[in-house]
C-alpha cells in the first residue's frame, strides 16, 4: 500500500557520500536534483562536508584528527536520520558507500515501515568488500 495520497508529493531522502563539491556525489546523486525536486519533497543528507572534499581529502594524514571527529559526528547524524527521518519517507535514494563502515541493519527498520530503497553504485566493484554496499544491495528495491 502506498503512503502517498492524491495531491501530496512523495517524500524522498537522498543520502550522498559527499556534499555538492564531491565528484562522485555530483555524478551519482546531485545530477538528479532538479528532477527530484520538481516532482518530490526531497531531503538531502551528505556524509562528508565540502570542507572534507576541499581540504582534508588531499592530505588525510595531516588531518587525521579532524577527519576522525567529523566521521564520528557524521555517524551520529546518519544514525539519527536512519532512525527518525527516513522512516517517514517513501523512498531512500542511497549513493554507494554513503554510510561508511556501517552495516545495512539500520535500513531494515526503514524497510519495515514501507520505505523503498534505491541504491546507486559505481563501477569500482573491487571496493565493495570495504563497505556495506553488498548488504544494502541485498535489501534494496532497485540497484542502479
Image (spheres, rainbow, N blue to C red):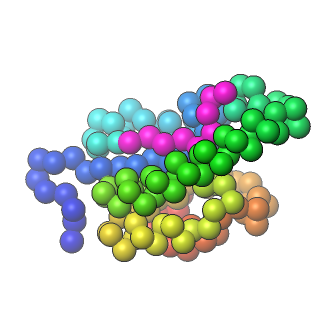
Residue 140, position in %: x, y? 49, 68
* Residue at horizontal 61 percent and vertical 45 percent from the top: 73
- Apparent side of residue 132 relative to residue 56 in the rendered image (left or right): left
Residue 93, position in %: x, y? 46, 53
**Observer able to see residue 93:** no
Above or below, comparing residue 126 to residue 18 in the picture: below
Q: How many labels does the image show?
A: 0
Which portion, as a residue range, is magenta? Answer: 43-51
Above or below, comparing residue 6 to residue 102 in the picture: above
Looking at the image, which is closer to me, 24 or 14? Answer: 14
**Observer able to see residue 36:** yes
Task: Verify whether residue 44 appears in magenta.
Answer: yes
Looking at the image, which is closer to me, 55 or 16? Answer: 55
Task: Verify whether residue 85 appears in magenta.
Answer: no
Extreme residue in the left direction? 6
Residue 131 location, quadrant: bottom right
- Apparent side of residue 30 relative to residue 109 in the rendered image (left or right): right
Q: Would you say the magenta stretch is mainly helix, strand or loop?
A: strand
- Apparent side of residue 35 relative to residue 94 in the rendered image (left or right): left
* Residue at horizontal 61 percent and vertical 33 percent from the top: 49
* Residue at horizontal 79 percent and vertical 39 percent from the top: 65
Residue 37 location, quadrant: top left
* Residue at horizontal 48 percent and vertical 67 percent from the top: 107
Looking at the image, which is closer to me, 100 or 142? Answer: 100
Above or below, comparing residue 137 to residue 60 in the picture: below
Residue 130 location, quadrant: bottom right
Residue 11, position in %: x, y? 30, 50
Residue 13, position in %: x, y? 40, 49
Looking at the image, which is closer to me, 6 or 97? Answer: 97
Amino acid at each position: 500500500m502506498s503512503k502517498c495520497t492524491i495531491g501530496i508529493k512523495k517524500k524522498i531522502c537522498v543520502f550522498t557520500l559527499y556534499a555538492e563539491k564531491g565528484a562522485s556525489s555530483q555524478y551519482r546523486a546531485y545530477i538528479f536534483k532538479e528532477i527530484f525536486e520538481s516532482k518530490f519533497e526531497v531531503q538531502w543528507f551528505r556524509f562528508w562536508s565540502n570542507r572534507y572534499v576541499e581540504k582534508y581529502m588531499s592530505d588525510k594524514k595531516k588531518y587525521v584528527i579532524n577527519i576522525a571527529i567529523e566521521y564520528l559526528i557524521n555517524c551520529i547524524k546518519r544514525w539519527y536520520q536512519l532512525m527518525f527521518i527516513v522512516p517517514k519517507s517513501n523512498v531512500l535514494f542511497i549513493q554507494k558507500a554513503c554510510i561508511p563502515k556501517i552495516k545495512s541493519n539500520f535500513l531494515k527498520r526503514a524497510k519495515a515501515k514501507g520505505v523503498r530503497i534505491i541504491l546507486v553504485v559505481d563501477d569500482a566493484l573491487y571496493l565493495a568488500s570495504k563497505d556495506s554496499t553488498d548488504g544494502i544491495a541485498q535489501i534494496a528495491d532497485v540497484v542502479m
